[in-house]
Image (tube, coloured by chain):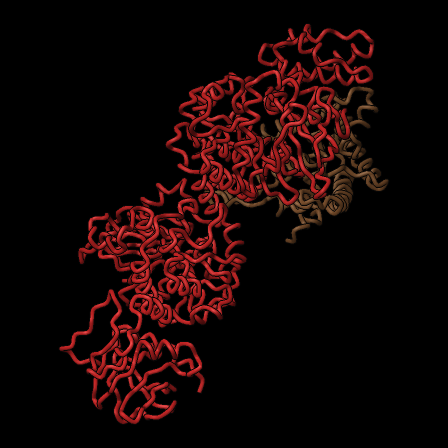
Chain colours: A brown, B red
Amino acid sequence: MSKASSITGWLEGLRAGDEVTAQRLWEEYFHRLVLMARARIAGRPTGPKGSDDVALSALDSFCRAAEAGRFPKLSDRDDLWQVLMMLTARKAIDAVRRESALQRGGGQLVREGPFFETIVGIEPTPSFAAEVAEQFRLLLDRLGDDELRQIAMWKLEGFTNPEIAGKIDKSLATVERKLQLIRRKWEADSADRE
Amino acid sequence: MPDRMLVGLTLSLTAAERHDRICDRFEAGWKEANPPRIEELLAEVPESERPSLFVALLRVELDRRRETPPNPEEYRDRFPAFADLVDTLFHNPAELPTCAGPVVDTEIEPPVIDGYEVTGMLGRGGMGVVFRARHVGLDRPAAIKMVSAGALSRPEQLVRFHLEARAVAGLSHPNVVALHDFGQVQGMPYFVMELVEGGSLADRLNGAPAAPAWSAGVVSQLARAVQHVHKRDIIHRDLKPANILLTQDDTPKITDFGLAKRIVGDDPRLTRTRSVLGTACYMSPEQARGNAKAVGPACDIYALGGILYECLTGRPPFRADSYELTIVQVLTEDPVRPSDLVFGLPIDLEAICLKCLEKDPAQRYSTAGELADDLDRFRDGQPVYARTPHVLERHAKWARKIGYDLGDLRGATRWFFTYLAHQQNINRTVRLKLSIGAVGTPAHAALKRQAEAMAGLDHPNVIRLYDYGEQFGQPYLVLEYLEGGESLSRRLRAQEPANGMSAEQQGTSGNESVNEGANDSTDETSHAPMPARAAAKLGVMLAIGLQAIHEHGILHCGLQTGDVVLTRDGTPKIGNFAAARRFDGVGDASGLKPEWVLPHYQSPEVVDEDWARLGKYSDIYALGAILYDLLAGAPPFAAPTLAETRDKVRRERPPAPTGAAPDLDAVVLKCLEKDPMRRYRSAGEVALALQLFLKPPQPGSSDSTSGSDRTVVPDGVPAPDPAISYRLRVVVGPARVGDSFEIPRRRIMMGRSKECDVVLPGKHVSRVQCGVIWNEGGWHEILDYGARNPTFVNAERVIGRRQLFPGDQIRFVNYALLFERLPRVAG
């Protein structure tokens, strides 16, 4: 897998100062991922709705934002996409782990490895996109507060913190605090599961 | 400066939610122009949560008061308990995102310093402000650190500032932020440092784990730098991710020596100050206990473990809601295993990390260099020392199965473990060298290559290989053990070599110990020089051993003083063929690991890892460097870092090693020529040149006709016994020093440079062209081929002339070397 063909690669590119390339690769990836995730949710047989609708409309707006050229910034310290994808990847790893543990009678784990790299290729796989969509739905659900949910979605749409502060007419400090809270809730949820 | 990790992230999720609601209420109050007072809101939460709530509230308030910025004094007065936090929030741009772009501090004017143009502010710490600047003349970016006015009022801070400058000034390491300049402007001290643009490690991690391999690489570099710092008797004492800067290409650099301490001799008052000496999260237990006496280099090793922990898990090893609670954890609790926090972490890396974080300093790595070595072992995919207790047990068990009792571990490098072992059935002591890694691993391949190189190599100046095998999946070498032997490097540095070979009389100098691998410390390279004649004698024997190695078809490729064992009687034996390769393997980069060998003794072509250019002359260079070391008391080139040493090897010319013995100096310097073609072409030539120094040819003696036993006998080897018959030995091809042959009366075609057959009894018939010249009077001059060649002179001088009678049998004790090049001469 070439250097630029993974999230790790982009992040490395970013560190190496190749910000433009990394951002472009991310945008390309992001757009495809969102389209795929959206198709996945839209294609689900009807079921208990609510959160699906919210997720679907959110993914819709991500698509629109991307088409309008507004992408989340990879270099953003508060970026929620990185959290979302990390959580999804971790979940996928869990699945792999369970599977291999079963196969080998619950024996040892495979050696370490940059799982993230192997799971997230430059081409988002349909199954990963599906996982992202599912994870996204779950995470939105678990925020439990409309304001947090709204901030999360704006953030995921690529709005900057000051822009979000303007939208909710609150201070930047508050937006940052809320983003931190969102992050913590998401991470706490994932920790609970494990 | 309070650690950001301590603030905000230390709360439980429920507490964070509670704070969020309080802040929302606070902000709603601001909108209605009737905000509650911060003091009242703080009272709603337990004491331990107040600092983080205070930060959250103050940030909202500062955002709201942006139009009319308040004075920090006001808040410091209102909240004396949080004065530090107020300072940070007001002045640290990272904590105040509303201040976009360069912040010009109200307290500190950008300094006006000759030659520098200040272009902005980079950050602010507890005692200083850092500006971004540019050296106008050099057009080089730089960072200028100033003491803040507040700090000026505290003399102790000022002293610290000076100490920091002094500590950093003595350091020169690629992983330490360099100090360019130090001075005062308007009574305020400043220093100019290298500007590192990539942000701190704390910013990079930002609470998330990094890749294990990346983390190991970064911490390994840091550990090497810390080793460098410790060597200069400085302890950093405040290593943490925020004090590690990253360059654009991810090279970590240690900064902020504000708490650094000389290991001896500092004003004790400065070290006893309670004011957050070291950040609690990374503070070693001995620091946390406040026992200044117990704080040594081990606390930096602990902190490196803390940094590794945070790289791996995204959080420091200990983090409680308050400074005091964190201290309690540091003192009493074991850190949560990193693999419990992050799935899939390599166990070895975790073991390294936890070994650094041992509460008892004695249980940690004893030096930062050892930590770096272990991390590098991990990066190479080799088992690490942190887990060796298991390895040792396993090896001992394994050895019993194949008939050896395992003794002490004598050397552990990245790829090999070397033990003393007792071979039960024949009751002898040997060295047992095991590859780390089973059959099929790179370490196994390396061990096997070594065995192949040594197989059949039997020479008094070379360590002998007894056996090689692979039993129960474990490859091993059995090597000669020399009771009472000692490595040359150790001998040189351990004692005054007062009269050279005095070691002969010191048979009790302990057991053999060979420094395999580049474990020689670069800082301990100097020692007392050895007298010229003693060094030359040692050199002759080394050259002869090297010659034998070359005749065996092998290049040693890593010769250094650590690889030479001196037997109890002072005879050198060349060992450690870890980097050796066959002549036909030259150009193959897989065999040699350059980090195994110190660049101090290696030729430019080895230092450049230019494998295609390797040759015997590369070993001859190393031989010259060892001689240089013996004579001058230090190798030809040595610099604080290996990289700098390599650079010197490439570019600089060494001064004459002795100055007092020009003939000997010339020999050594010829070995050390940068251009391989200008060096001696065989180790034999070096031996001869050294012989000439030891025993210059005496006029007349070479024309002696007194008989067949007239040979120039080098010192240090037994003189030929006139009572036995001698044979002229011509070494051809696989024959070795010590072989002999009878002058084949009929088969040597006498005449000028005629082709002739040389018969080696018991060997084979080789067709060579050799310079055996027959004179009218029955004189034979035994010359190297090609009269224009400088060896001609040596040959003539050393071998001299002698009358040979049919059937004469002449033994040349050492001069067989001369003929070594004969087979290569084209027809």
Q: Tell me if residue B67 comes above or below residue B417 in the rendering.
A: above
Lateral position of residue B825 relative to residue B411, left or right: right
- Residue sitting at the far left: B723
Instruction: Decide if residue B536 is in sight here.
Output: yes
* Front residue (pair B503, B202): B503
Q: Quadrant of residue B117?
A: top right
Q: Tell me if residue B296 comes above or below residue B571 in the rendering.
A: above
- Residue at image position (29%, 83%) is B801
- Residue at image position (38%, 33%) is B363
- Residue sitting at the far front: B699
Q: Quadrant of the N terminus of chain B?
A: top right
* Front residue (pair B213, B515): B515
The percent coordinates of residue B143 (x first, y second) are 66, 34
- Residue at image position (31%, 70%) is B696
Instruction: Decide if residue B449 is in sight here.
Output: no
Q: Quadrant of residue A33?
A: top right
Q: Quadrant of residue B752?
A: bottom left
Q: How many marks?
A: 0
The percent coordinates of residue B399 (x first, y second) are 28, 52
- Residue sitting at the far right: A68
